[in-house]
Amino acid sequence: MHVATFTACVLMGLACAVVGRLLDMEKIVMTVPTVLVAIPGSSALRTLLYFDQRDVVSALENGVSTVLVLIAMVAGLACARMLTDPEWAFTRPDPPWGRRLATLSVRRLLPRRSGRAGTGRPEAADGQPPPSGPTPSEPGAPE
């Protein structure tokens, strides 16, 4: 079943690429409506119904099957896209797998929190602590 889904999505992607070229339209305009009708909604609904009936084994069977069908759909569409648009996968000027993994640190991925860790004092925009001295809200500050 999953091989059939993969093959069908490859064929849908190839057909959408051909029709898109003939009609001078983007591939995505043709592909999305075509694939939306193939999403396994009944299997996902059965998963939820089995969970509601406390039939965990049947629910997990349907859930895994639904996920595998979705993965086959994505893989089939990606394969069709690679076949019809080689630049998309193979000749990008900055491929994602070519970046050094060391540059992908947690600090770059997570947003920076205001304030320095453990001090409770805010940081300036350049990362430097604010100048010391009384703030206008403190007693003894010049007005």
Image (cartoon, grey):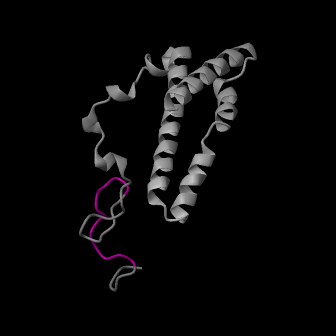
Quadrant in the rendering for residue 120:
bottom left
Q: At 66% from the left edge and 18% from the top edge, which residue is drawn?
A: 15
Question: Residue 17 location, x and y as percent?
Answer: 64, 18
Quarter of the image with the C terminus in it: bottom left
Q: How many marks?
A: 0
Q: Where residue 106 sits: x, y (%)?
A: 29, 48
Q: Nearer the viewer, residue 29 or 124?
A: 29
The residue closer to the viewer here, 29 or 6, is 6
Report the magenta residues as a range.
Answer: 125-136
Rendered residue at 69%/34% (across/down): 33
Residue 59 vertical placement versus 8 (above, below): below
> What secondary structure prevails in the magenta region?
loop
Residue located farthest toward the right when viewing the structure as drawn: 23
What residue is at 69 percent from the left and 27 percent from the top? 30
Q: Position of residue 38 (x, y in %)?
A: 64, 36
Q: Does residue 126 show up magenta in the picture?
A: yes
Q: Is residue 65 left or right of residue 37?
A: left
x and y, in percent, of residue 50 in the image = 54, 59
Work out whether residue 43 or residue 12 is closer to the camera in this orientation and state it: 43
Apparent side of residue 117 relative to residue 75 in the rendered image (left or right)? left
Q: Is residue 15 magenta?
A: no
User: Along the horizontal axis of the image, is 129 left or right of 69?
Assistant: left
